[in-house]
Image (tube, grey):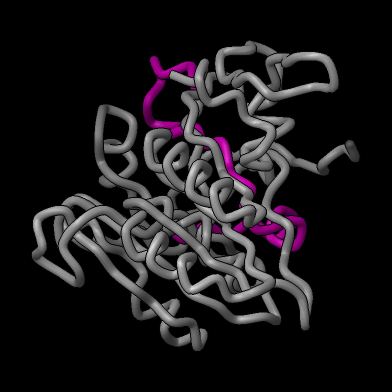
Amino acid sequence: MLAVPMLEQTVQIVSNERDTDSYFRLVLRAPQIAPLIQPGQFAHVRVLPLKGALLRRPFSIFQVTGDTFSILYKTVGQGTEALARMGSGEELSAIAPLGHGFTVPRRGGETPLLVAGGYGMAAMYLLAQRSPQKGIVFVGGRRRIDILCEKEFEALGWDVRTTTEDGSHGEKGLVTQPLLKELKRKAPYRKVFACGPTGMLGAVGKIAGEFNVPAELSMDEHMCCGVGVCLTCVIPIKTGDGWEYQRTCTEGPVFDAREVVWETVK
């Protein structure tokens, strides 16, 4: 596997604005990092004002524009709450781009089917933007406020199909339901790409396998170091004569669904 270039830099906040409810969009100026970013990679960020916080926080990279990249994040704890209070001109420490991302579809190849749960949408946008082959985006969330980026995907010319568990937006149910319906059409040459909670990814991988459709999944595992040293983010991956643990921060976060040993994934 080829080494992925990465840089550790102090980056400047361009904007940090509320998106919906507790979700924020953070734009960072990083002229050396931005050109290196590939779809599905992530950034490991340290909030400098939090002097006592030793660990960085991983965020999927959402968009790349010129010398900037952006992330979508939800305030869920001390770190992200401190991040939400920061504004334009302030600085963060970032290591990026990290991990091996998605395989960008080629023109005339398989039709891409993107499946995202919650802010798993953040990891999918750059893939859709850089894919010459347009397809379908299946977006799922618990409530309306958990549905992100619909307009951005529609602006790219993709077919966006939305589900919410409470029925407050789009079709009521799980995001896997419209995916299953689409795969039952048995149209040729499709490939699934997904990012979201582990349970959703397992269901997507199973469905893709049942229809013999290839699938790449961005695995949702807790990370500490983000650079392959601490081994806290490992998942079981099949090998020729069994399986072995691989790190989602370096060998992943994107894996072939057929290679994941799902019965041992927590």
Whether residue 9 appears in this view of the structure is no
Give coordinates of residue 70: x percent, y percent. Answer: 50, 59
Residue 128 occupies quadrant = bottom right
Quadrant showing the C terminus: top left
Name the main secondary structure of what is drawn in magenta: loop
Q: Which residues are magenta?
A: 27-55
Residue 31 occupies quadrant = bottom right
Give coordinates of residue 189: x percent, y percent. Answer: 69, 71
Q: Is residue 42 left or right of residue 171?
A: right
Q: Is 81 rendered above or below residue 158?
A: above
112 and 258: which is toward the camera: 258
Q: Residue at x 53, y 26 (%)?
A: 262
In the rendered image, residue 166 lying in the magenta stretch gets the answer no
Q: Residue at x 29, y 45 (%)?
A: 74
Q: Is residue 117 left or right of residue 194?
A: left
In the rendered image, residue 44 lying in the magenta stretch gets the answer yes
Quadrant showing the N terminus: top right
Give coordinates of residue 139: x percent, y percent. Answer: 35, 63
Give coordinates of residue 255: x percent, y percent. Answer: 66, 39
248 and 187: which is toward the camera: 187
Q: Is residue 51 left or right of residue 230?
A: left
